[in-house]
Image (spheres, rainbow, N blue to C red):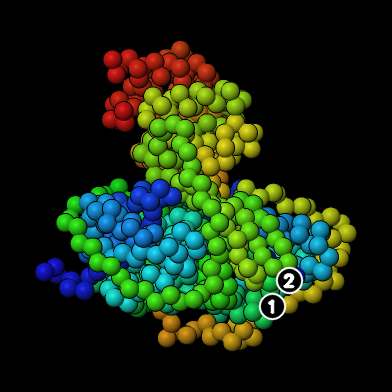
Amino acid sequence: MKIVVLVKEVPDTYGERRLDLETGLADRAASEAVLDEIGERALEVALAHADAHEGTEVVVMSMAPESAAATIRKGLAMGAASAVHIADPGLAAADLGLTARALAAAIRRTGFDLVITGNLSTDGSGGVLPAMLAELLEVPNATALTSVEITDGSVSGTRDVDGGTMRVSAQLPAVISITEALPDARFPNFKGIMAAKKKPFETLAAADLGIEPADLSAAWSIMTAIAERPPRTAGTKITDEGDGGTRIAEFLIENRLV
Amino acid sequence: MSDHPADQILVVLETTPNGDLAASAAGLLAAASGIGTPVALVVTAPGGAQALAEQAAALGAERVLAVETPAAQSELTVPHVDALAAAAAAVAPNAVLISESVDGRDIAGRFAARSGAPIAVDAVGLSRDDEGVVAHHSVYGGAYTLASAATFGPLLVTVRQGAIDARAEARPVVLESLEVAASGASSAAIESVEPVTESSSRPELRGAKRVVSGGRGLGSAEQFALVEELADALGAAVGASRAAVDAGYVPANHQVGQTGVSVSPQLYIALGISGAIQHKAGMQTAKNIVAVNKDPDAPIFEVADFGVVGDVFTVVPQLISALAERKR
C-alpha cells in the first residue's frame, strides 16, 4: 500500500507570526518555520500502519517554497520512505484552487492508495483542501477523523461533527484527514536523521505537473485588503486585597456584561 | 424589486443529527441578507424539508430549495455537493455561503473543486462593493484583518461559526423542491451517527456570547468544577486551555486556542490561565476579557480588560456570590 501524507511548513505558533503588508504573504523571515504539528500526527498514522504492515510505503509531500526542503526532510527522518516537494516561484501566491490542482496532480503522479492530511493547518485554518483533493482525485473523503483503522481495501474511523459522533468508512483509494485527537508524532532519532540523507527527495515544478500557475481562465480568490489589527492593550490590573471577586462583579455590571 | 435583480446569495444550511437546522443557520442567513437575497438550500432525509423550510424562513430565507434523499443520511458530503451543484445552476448566485464546520468545509471543498469557484475560508464577515461580494477574515489569531474576493464569478465562502451577530427578519415560507442528478462521485459511507447527549444546559462553546475558561491553575479535575460553577452563574460556555485539557481536567472539545476552538464572545473570563500565545490566538478577539491568575507576570494580563492578581479559589467564589446577590 502506498500512503501519501501531506505536510506543511508553517510559522511556529510559539513565536509572533507576521504577514507582509505589501504582498499579503506570510513573512517567512519573521518567525521560525516548523513542520505543522497536525501534519506530523498525520504522518504518525501512516508510519504506525507501516510499522505493523510490511509492504507499506509512506511518501511525504508538500507544496512550499524551495526554502522549506529542510523542514520536509524531517518527515524522512521520522520514517517516510521518500519525499515530494512541489516548489515553484510561480505558485507563491497560489489560492486554494491552484494549490489543490497542483497537489492532486503530484499525488496522481506519485500514485496512492490513501492520502492522509491534517484537518486544519495552524496558519491557513481553511480545512477545505482534503475534500478538494478527494473531488479532483475522484475518490471518497473521510475527514476530521479522531480514530483511524486502515485495512488492505478500506479506511474507517470516527469523526466528531457538530452535535454528534459519526462512524464512517470508505473504500480505498481515499483521502482522509485527522484531528489532534490522534497521537503525537514520534521524534526522529539519529539513525533516522542519517538515513534521511539517502532517501529519495524529488523536487517538482508546476510545469512537471502540467500546471499553469498564471492561468487566468480559472477564477481566483484574491486578497483585496490587509491591515494589522492594533495590538490589544492591557486594561486595569489589580492585586486581590480581599475584594477581587467583588471588583470583577462591578466591572461586569458597569460594562453591562451581566 | 431590489436594486440587484440578480443578487441572490445561496446559503447551504446544515442539519443536526436530530434533523433540525444547525445553529449556524441564523448567522449565515443574516450574512446573506446583508449582501443580497438569501436563498437557502437544505438536504435532508425524505419528509424533512417542510419543517426545515419553516425554520429557515423564520431566520430570513426568502426561498428554500429542498432536496429530500435517503443518501443524506448514508453518504458523506457527496449528496450535499450534488444538491449544491444543482442549486447553483438553478440560482446563478453572486456568492455561496457555507458554515465553517466539519461537514461544511467538506461540502465547500468538493464543490469548489468541482465547479472551479474560488473559495474564501473562515470569513468573519461579508460585504459588497462595486465589483461584487467581499469576504472579511481575521487571521493569525486576530492579529490581521484581510479582505478577499473572486477575480470573476461567484465566491464560495465558509463563514466562521458565531462570527455574525446580526439576525435577519423572518419571511414567509417559500419551499421549492429541487431535482438533482447524482454525480456518481465516490463517497464515504456513514455507518452510524450518535447525537451528543448534552448533560447540561450550558451553551456550545463555539458561538457562545460568554465563555469562562480554566487552565492549569485549577489544579485538578475536581477543582475545575469552579469554572463550571461560574459559567453556570453567567449562562456561559465552558472553555479550557490546552494545559488543562492535557492534564485531563476537561475533555478536548473544550479547548480554546490555536489548535482548539476560536471564540469571539462578548465576555471571556480566563481563570488560572497563563495565556500562552496559542491560547491568546483563540480568544483575543473577545470583546471583553477578564483574567484571574496568581502570577502577576502571566501574559494573559497583557490582553485583559480587567485583571485580578489573586487566587482563583478565593476570587471566583466571591464573584459568584456577588452575582447571586445581584440577581436577588
Compared to B130, does B206 lie above or below?
A: above
Q: How dense is the environment of label 1, judged by Cα within 10 Å: few (below 14), some, or many (20 and up)?
A: some
Q: Which badge, 1 or 2, comes first in the chain's sequence?
A: 2
For residue B308, above or below residue A15:
above
SS type, badge 2: strand
Image position, residue A68 (x, y; %): 67, 67
Residue A2, which numbered label? 2
Q: Position of residue B109 (x, y in %)?
A: 47, 67
Task: Answer above or below: position of B97 versus B216.
Answer: below
Q: Residue at x 56, y 76 (%)?
A: A138
Q: The numbered mark 1 sits on a residue in which chain? A: A
* Residues packed near mark 2 inside 10 Å, few (<14), some (14 to 19) or many (20 plus): some
Point out which mark residue A111 bears: 1
Residue A117 position in % (x across, y down): 62, 62
What amino acid is found at the position of numbered circle 1 in the picture?
A: Gly
In the image, what residue type sits under mark 2? Lys
Circles 1 and 2: CB distance less than 8 Å?
Answer: yes
